[in-house]
Image (cartoon, rainbow, N blue to C red):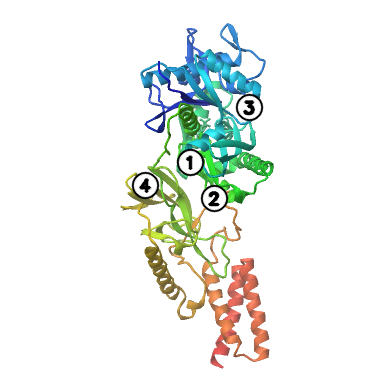
Amino acid sequence: MSDVIIGIDLGTTNSEVAVVQNGIPVVLTGEDGDPILPSVVGLSDQGKLLVGKPARNQYPLFPERTIKSIKRLMGKDEKIKLGDREYRPPEISAMILKALKERAEKALGHSVNKAVITVPAYFNDTQRQATIEAGSLAGLEVKRILNEPTAAALVYDPQQTAGLHVLVYDLGGGTFDVSIVHWEQGIVEVLASHGDTQLGGDDFDELLLNHVAGQFMTEHQIDLRTDRSTRARLLRACENAKKQLSDFAFTKVEEEFIAEKDGVPLHLSMEVSRGDFEKLIQPLIDRTMDSVQKALNDSKLSASQIDRVVLVGGSTRTPVIGIILENLLGRPPRRDINPDLCVAMGAAVQAAMIAGSTVGAVLVDITPHSLGIKTLDPSSSMYGERLIFTPIVRRGTPLPVSRSEVFRTVTDHQPRVEIDVYQGESENLRQNHRVGMFLIEGLGKFPAGNQIVVQLDLTLDGVLKVSAREKATGLSKQIVIDNALETMDSEERAESANQLDELWRDRFQDDLGEDSDEIGDESDDDEGLEYEPNEAARPMPMMDVGPREGQREAVQARALLEKADRLRTKATSEDQAELDRLMQNVRVSMEDRNWPKLEQASNALADVLFYLEDA
Ligand code: AMP
């Protein structure tokens, strides 16, 4: 018999068990090597008990003999039927706990009979008691019931002593919680907690399913949702596609022989972009952000008083969530510890502390800086466009990582794109470090808005592969950069700023001729790339998201306005009035984006300038 205490995350969708070994929390895997045990219990067709994956797999086909989400019923005076018997919720939970206990015993090689089990912060006393009862039915003495957000906060900093406010955003498969905890001298207090027990990644899958099924219906007049097993296959394909979209800008929902029409089999192969998916789930994400706001209000804290933001639950891998949270709270969330596992790890940390062991910080290899490329700022005004840094892999992402984003060209028939790779945190390119550059040339003759997918693959050793692909044709190019993880020192930063200054100076002269060096930042139209933003994720003024057909006219007009400003001082008051009128016409048509009118107005202004120059 051993004194080891295991830590258990008894989740609505999934559960895990962890233990501290050599001072570090480790999540224990089952025989299949997977640390995640689906919180599903069922009976096979021979009436045998199934727990975990086999039960989850049979759910779509045999929901009548499978029980999911028992956590929602904990503490309720309800019975649930399985086979020919009825069970109370703690009895079903006990089956999951028993499977986890067995997993731990196999992994550790000895029996285990004590546990710390986590519950949501909003669980009331009855629900907590039901969880303790489930533990005891499974043969586990529950040493402590721990709040899930506290567990998540613990794992990030077991030795923390200073006062700290941590916001824990937890979005799993079926539930959402946000909590604000205060941490001082090892005492953790939950200040506020909000959530929605009926909102999670499963809803994202449903939305994607309806989107795909709707399109299939339009194309083939067949509803894939009516047949139970077809729907189940489609749902699984949609969940896979959703996970792909966390890393890649596009994916395909694919299923062979999904239906039949007039005796001919139909296959499903539908492309979905991350942008399409984000639009579908936006209303749900908004609801979670309303809860974040409520939690802030309840805790009487402002966003700036939150010291740390922690992501928990598999669905927080959806990148737009981190971006919106960062916009709202002004700091990037911690994402280094696997969001599926960090509650179980925190339970193990608490368990080890109760047992009197010391626990160290979990060290994960992460990107120390964000990596991304140079793009045009879509919110810059027509009077001076700006080039900015757009991150693709964000700081603190665990390694290895593959991420892609979609960008688009800014001019019609743009023949090439410059992929300029930077490392850093500032939107201002000069503050960042340039790690490499290449051109992708020979793009197709497409209007502005031609999609270019840029993908970064970064290994644990810091080898960075950057590839760019013209989506319409598949034309692609890539480079490999060694040592992309090396950080820059202040000297390098200064050097990098100088290089950029030089680059701009040369560039303006190339672009606009001798008058142009006094004009604001301007991109090279032949190489410019614009980030294709999700408006909700990046709340920027979007005055300039349409195709850039007026780019050339605008560049010329700006040069003329500059020249007019300079010559105006030499002009008579009569000519000044005329100049003011003509300049105003240019500005108005530029703001209206009326390119034919802008050309006319520019020509009229050019005529007067010509006359003034000669005078
Ligand atoms: P949890 O209940 O915390 O285990 O979270 C499970 C949910 O996370 C399910 O809805 C999964 O589909 C979702 N999930 C897992 N991995 C990803 C991913 N890479 N991107 C988006 N959602 C994910």
Q: Secondary structure at mark 2?
A: loop
Q: CA distance from mark 3 to mark 4?
A: 41 Å
Mark 1 vs ligand 1: CB below 8 Å: yes
Q: Secondary structure at mark 1?
A: helix
Residues at discs 4 and 2 in contact (Cβ within 8 Å): no
What's under tag 3, amino acid-wise?
Phe
Mark 2 vs ligand 1: CB below 8 Å: no
Q: CA distance from mark 1 to mark 3?
A: 31 Å
Residue 458 numbered mark, or none? 4
Identify the mark nearer the N-term, 1 or 4.
Answer: 1
- Mark toward the viewer: 4 or 2: 2
Residue 490 numbered mark, or none? none
Q: Is residue 411 visible?
A: no
Residue 331 numbered mark, or none? 2
Residue 433 at x, y = what percent? 40, 60
What's under tag 2, amino acid-wise?
Arg
Q: Residues within 10 Å of mark 1 (few under 14, many from 20)?
A: some
Q: Which residue is mark 3?
A: 123
Q: Secondary structure at mark 3?
A: loop
Q: Residues within 10 Å of mark 4 (few under 14, many from 20)?
A: many
Residue at horizontal 41%, vertical 45%? 366
- Mark toward the viewer: 2 or 1: 2
Asked if 287 appears above or below 529 in the picture, the reply is above
- Mark toward the viewer: 1 or 3: 3
